[in-house]
Amino acid sequence: MAYPMFHNLIGGEWLAAQSGKTILNLNPANHADVVGAFPSSHADDVALAVVAAKKAFASWRLVAAPKRAEILVRAGLLLQQRKEQYAHDMTREMGKVLAETRGDVQEAIDEAFYAAGEGRRLFGQTTPSELQNKFAMSVRMPVGVVGLITPWNFPMAIPSWKLFPALVSGNTCVIKPATDTPLSTYNLVQALVDAGLPAGVVNIVSGTGSAVGAALVEHPDVRAISFTGSSEVGSHVAQRAAATFKPVSLEMGGKNAQIVLDDANLELALEGALWGSFGTTGQRCTATSRILLQKGIADRFTAEFVARANQLKVGNGLDESVEVGPQVNASQIETSKKYVEIALAEGAKLLAGGHALTQGVYAHGTFFEPTVIGGVTPGMRIAREEVFGPVVSLIEFESFEEAIEIANSIDYGLSTALYTKDVNRAFTAIRDLEAGITYINAPTIGAEVHLPFGGVKRTGNGHREGNGAIDFFTTWKAVYVDYSDKLQRAQIDNAE
Ligand code: UN1
């Protein structure tokens, strides 16, 4: 079957990988559907892209920030026009249902307008000097060439979280799209190109993490790396980047808890848990993977939740009636299977799903049943390790304090949710939950682009995307302007 060939974007030109090799992008709902062939690039392609980005940096950094921002506004408007097409492309390459891929494109649109607003802010500070007739201020400077390594689960939104703030700040970029879902990054960058982005300001180099990602991290002229992916890979990235003292922003795993107290609106908690656990087929770093149930409502919640999980329609995300799409690839299916086995071996109970779907309409894709595991205790591996699939654990508790303790007892700290009507407990949870995000009466998924996004512990290394990305993509310069026309010695001439 014929399928399109895609090339790297380097210095404004579309170039094949120097290896001449490609990687096929397959529809996870139907592997016979080949979305396209993308370059299988290596360090030599990365090197070319970095040269192009370095060259473009010399002029891009001098474009006034409000003008850089206008390109983002135009790109945002183009994304609005192309939303439906790009959502279809994304469902085809990634699997999640159309309502969600429309949301993913929308998140990129939101980010375009939000980051564009920074073009007229990029605020620094002024402060009094300790000396007379001397002016002191701090200004934000771009970092230079930045390397962006992005995941497959939000194949347009997450690249936009990195590209747009990096660009408005005056950096030039080399982006490595996820190996499974490069088309959405291409679509995003195409919108930027059509919006008038100069050649070389954004370069795309496709390929595997071990070839392209590693080369970006090690390249001496790449000044910073922004990475979203697993904690294992993130740890390698940070260690390798340390050799050249590159700042690294890491956005990694989660094991997010939704806590439901006895006084909660049960219907709301059920809807939230279902959406948080099985939206995006559980493949979000913010996905609900532990539901903590207070004893008084646990039985009722469990029965209803299991019934609803069993009713979810699994299938090809291009079918508007489908609620849960495929997992992105066979290796993710293996992980889901493995964790179901581990959970059962540890003594937990399978309450719903638990198996790959392989027959009939599912025969040519990578589908897994929405899976609910009950009788889970906080020490079990299924309660502690990230699955990144449609597998959720139910854990029961007695007191509010115990729930907070269980929620915090893991190595991750991205998102948390509490369902209650008790305002005192809500604010106590906001204070005490160890996570970058806490929702009250809303599920663990659904962050908005203009708030800080990121987490603690194994989830991140302290940086934030959204409101916070500018801090990563700029570096401070302190500026002193002495208009006294004489030598004034700091710490000496102001002594008396
Ligand atoms: C992710 O899963 O990596 O908050 C990002 C959310 C989305 C982003 C998820 N807006 O669920």
Image (spheres, grey):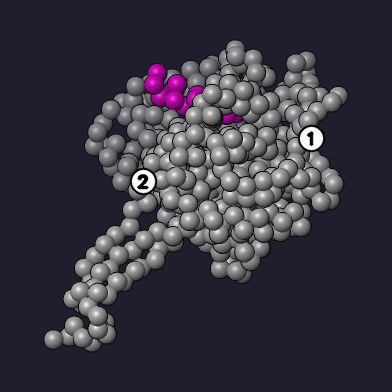
For mark 1, give the secondary structure: loop
Disc 2 target residue: 120
Residue 395 visible in the current orientation: no
Q: Is residue 332 above or below residue 134?
A: above
Q: Position of residue 21 (x, y in %)?
A: 84, 45
448 with respect to 480 (left or right): right
> Which residue does the image show at 72% across and 56% down from the upper left?
48
Label 1 vs 2, first from the N-terminus? 1
Location of residue 145 by image quarter:
bottom right
> Which residue does the image show at 81% across and 51% down from the upper left?
18
For mark 2, give the secondary structure: loop
Q: Which residues are magenta?
A: 267-281
Badge nearest the viewer, 1 or 2:
2
Q: Quadrant of the C terminus?
A: bottom left
> Which residue does the image show at 44% across and 25% down from the upper left?
272
Disc 1 target residue: 5
- The prevailing secondary structure element of the residues shown in magenta is helix
For marks 1 and 2, give the CA distance: 39 Å
Q: Is residue 7 above or below residue 484?
A: above
246 with respect to 37 (left or right): left
Q: Position of residue 376 (x, y in %)?
A: 53, 36
Q: Residues within 10 Å of mark 2 (few under 14, many from 20)?
A: some
Residue type at numbered disc 1: Met
Residue type at numbered disc 2: Arg
> Which residue does the image show at 29% across and 36% down from the upper left?
426
Q: Quadrant of the N terminus?
A: top right
Query: Is label 1 in contact with label 2 (beta carbons under 8 Å)?
Result: no
